[in-house]
Amino acid sequence: MKSIQKTVSPLDGSVYVERELATCDQVRKALQLALDGQKQWSALPLEERQSICSRAVDCFVEKKEEIALELTWQMGRPIQYSGSEVDGFEERARHMIEASSSALKTISLPKRRGFDRYIKKEPLGVVLVIAPWNYPYLTAVNSIVPALLSGNAVILKHSAQTPLCAERMVEAFQAAGLPEGIFQYLHMSHDETRNLIQSGGVRHVAFTGSVPAGKVIEQAAAGQFVSVGLELGGKDPAYIREDADLDMAVDSVLDGVFFNSGQSCCGIERLYVHQAVYDDFLVRAEKFVNRYKLGPAQNAETTLGPMVKVSAAEFVRKQIEEAVGLGAQKLIDEKKFPQSNPGTPYLAPQLLTNVDHSMGIMKEESFGPVAGIMKVSSDEEAIALMNDSDFGLTAAIYTRDLEKGAELGDQIETGTCFINRCDYLDPSLAWTGVKDSGRGCTLSELGFEVLTRPKSYHIKQC
């Protein structure tokens, strides 16, 4: 009897998608198909691989409206924003297609005493991509497209919450003429995923998800001598200096807190505001948050949708109430968001004041529409608090003094430092984290390095 995977929509609690989980035999056959085709795929000229990937992006974008609606029903993002993920997929994919010409270029070294020397960048083989539900296309494209361009075959295991995303991506590449077996999806159990990692056929695992799940991935890969890329959690901070443009800072940083209902690994979860502008910031922040429209994500007027699951919303509710019990104060009147009710995935946006680092709300990842706000008296205090975290994915500084902002950024333990913006991935820049936010790199030309291995040639001239 086959196991059935059910995707429950956060919009109305209905089962939106049902899929059979792959059996051990199906996983084995998919891996063999990838292994059989990968060498022929890597032998193709890069220009041909680029052309196929470009056509695949065209095929994907053609179904933007359909993909956006499916995305809304699977994970709850308001329909007015879902199409932007297709746009982001296209932006990143096309950038990586263009960047691959330089990133995969053979490194030629100067001739030396009758020797030719160069370094080629060879594909690893089969890459397993394990993608999350919160940005199901944007996270997956970061590894899938450069892996294919590098000459690897890819097997995609997507979240049980967003199985259609895996199917739509593979469908687009098939329509573009990608050879059989080079890009496949598998709806798998945790056990089958672990078995695939330990099969000996996978040479790289690209995982995006939680810290506990990342540890499981590392344990599964132990002793396999395979590379592992981990994009894990975040508790990303922002610092509003006394010289910040407050109108811009409030609009930018609070969008970073609440977009996607706060369900972003690089979303802002803790704010440090200089005492000189603290009170003014709170007044503006309250007005900003009260403009949100919490409601069903399929409604055009909704700007804040449900969280992905009731359990996720209940976790954030508990985190908020624990902080309040320790003295935190709610800035937002939750009665202004009547859709928010315990036992549902609908949760009112919230900002907490009178918080400190003894509270979980300032230390543990929330992954929801909430942030704590602390008053600070100096740059030094702000930097110390920003670094007082197990995470280090992104950090943001809002200031008119860009030179000082960059100087402070050098002191922050983070993978990306933003100045006067937040919660954005520029495909030209390396996406990476420190501490519990993971290791490895995607995007930019550096992202190709983890998907290839160097092969040196040292040739004596006759």
Image: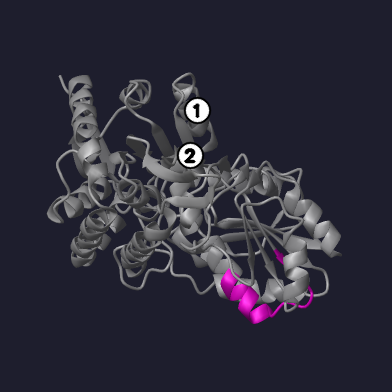
Q: Which residue is mark 1?
A: 218
In front: 425, or 70?
A: 425
Instruction: Give the residues drawn in magenta, as a range.
Output: 239-252
Q: Which residue is painted at 44% across and 28% down in the image? A: 226
Counting from the top left corner in percent of width and height, residue 153 is at: 28, 39
Counting from the top left corner in percent of width and height, residue 357 is at: 76, 46
Helix, strand, or loop for circle 1?
helix
Q: Is residue 239 left or right of residue 234?
A: right
In front: 442, or 230?
A: 442
In front: 204, or 325?
A: 204
Q: Which residue is painted at 20% across and 52% down in the image? A: 173
Q: Is residue 189 above or below residue 242?
A: above
Counting from the top left corner in percent of width and height, residue 70 is at: 24, 56
Q: Quadrant of residue 122?
A: top left
User: Total marks drawn?
Assistant: 2
User: Quick check: can you spot residue 355?
Assistant: no
Q: Earlier in the sequence, mark 2 or mark 1?
A: 1
Residue type for callout 2: Gly
Q: Quadrant of the C terminus?
A: top left
In space, the residues marked 2 and 1 are separated at their CA atoms by 9 Å
Q: Quadrant of the N terminus?
A: top left
Q: Which residue is mark 2?
A: 229
Task: Report the residue that reaches farthest toward the front.
Answer: 462
Q: Is residue 456 above or below residue 215?
A: below
Q: Which residue is painted at 59% across and 65% down in the image? A: 333
Q: Is residue 454 left or right of residue 211?
A: left
Residue type for callout 1: Glu
- Whether 244 is among the magenta residues is yes
